[in-house]
Amino acid sequence: MNITHVGIDLAKMVFQVHGIDARGKVGLRKQLRRSQVMAFFAQLPSCLIGIEACAGAHFWARKLTELGHTVKLIAPQFVKPYVKTNKNDAADAEAICEAVGRPNMRFVPIKNTAQQALLGLHRAQIRSIGRKLPEILEDAENGLSGMSRALFARLFEHFRKLDRQVEELEREINAWHREDTASQRLQMIPGIGPLTASALVASVGDAKVFKNGRQFAAWLGLVTRQHSSCGKTKLLSISKRGDTYLRTLLIHGARSVLLHLKRRPDLVEGRLARVAARRNSNIAAVALANKNARTVWALLAHDRDYQTGYRSANAIAVA
């Protein structure tokens, strides 16, 4: 039997494999140890392999691609509807196999080692615990016991060491940003700095895997959910799917732009300025983040520079 589609359910040590032929007939149900995976797929004729996107999925996608297979990563929420029975490894592998063959399925871009290394720098950062702690430790009248004071002092010293390491990580990120043309191009968008730009470039890879800017914004969870029926459209809050870190960076960057809107009205187009004037600040920030995400896709997919007030040929024709 010629296997054409394979679904793999990843785990730490034991992988479940499910394969079908061109007619959809099941021809492969197998459990593999981690050490057996490469040898097994090296003997299997080239086929389409689906893997549920997770931390280790990018590694296996690269390895299986080297063997001549076509590998697609699928977000977990798009696999779940294809699970036919109770959740287990075999059912998950079958669902992945079914999902990867769908013609309209959306896939997650496969990251290379350099992209994952850069994202590792981003994920290793920590937030400041505030500048008030030294004052609290020095205040002898605040009722803090000597034992607690000594404990917090030790923890704060440990934090300061971590904070210095974070500063070193940020310098490495900025150094990478200065050497990458695409990252510098994204920095020209109001609300996007070196941190956000480098994280986007490292996460997205090939932007052309997304059909358009809206699909990219949806991948980041910046579009509204729908609960429509009987011809009535009901829009809810944003879906919050996808990468929380990227979505947070974009929204915080948008908030920064809106804070400076009165002093710099040229930072956003007229429609967004009107939204900021009449709607809640959070809604305006998400709207700007959504627009920035679409702009990011356009710059990466079409390899062009940011232009203030740019309008596409279609938009001009409609106007």
Image (tube, grey):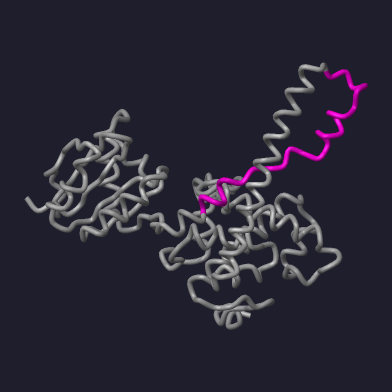
Q: Nearer the viewer, residue 48 or 13?
A: 13
Magenta-span inclusion, residue 80: no
At a point 29% along the width and 51% down the height, the residue shown is: 100
Position of residue 169 in the picture relative to residue 9 (left or right): right
Q: Is residue 32 above or below residue 317?
A: above
Q: Nearer the viewer, residue 147 or 281?
A: 147
At a point 37% along the width and 45% down the height, the residue shown is: 56
Image quadrant assignment for residue 16: top left
Position of residue 265 in the picture relative to residue 237 (left or right): right
Q: Which residue sits furthest right?
A: 141
At a point 51% along the width and 56% down the height, the residue shown is: 118
Q: Is residue 61 above or below residue 309?
A: above
Q: Nearer the viewer, residue 207 or 87?
A: 207
Range of magenta residues: 119-144
Q: Is residue 91 above or below residue 281?
A: above
Percent x, y for residue 258?
A: 77, 59
Percent x, y for residue 103?
A: 30, 58
At a point 52% along the width and 63% down the height, the residue shown is: 201
Quarter in which the C terminus is drawn: bottom right
Work out whether residue 258 can be spotted. yes
Magenta-span inclusion, residue 120: yes
Q: Is residue 132 above or below residue 69?
A: above
Q: Nearer the viewer, residue 89 or 32?
A: 32
Percent x, y for residue 88?
A: 29, 30
Q: What is the number of callouts on the image?
A: 0
Percent x, y for residue 292?
A: 62, 63
Q: Which residue sits furthest left?
A: 1
Work out whether residue 239 can be spotted. no
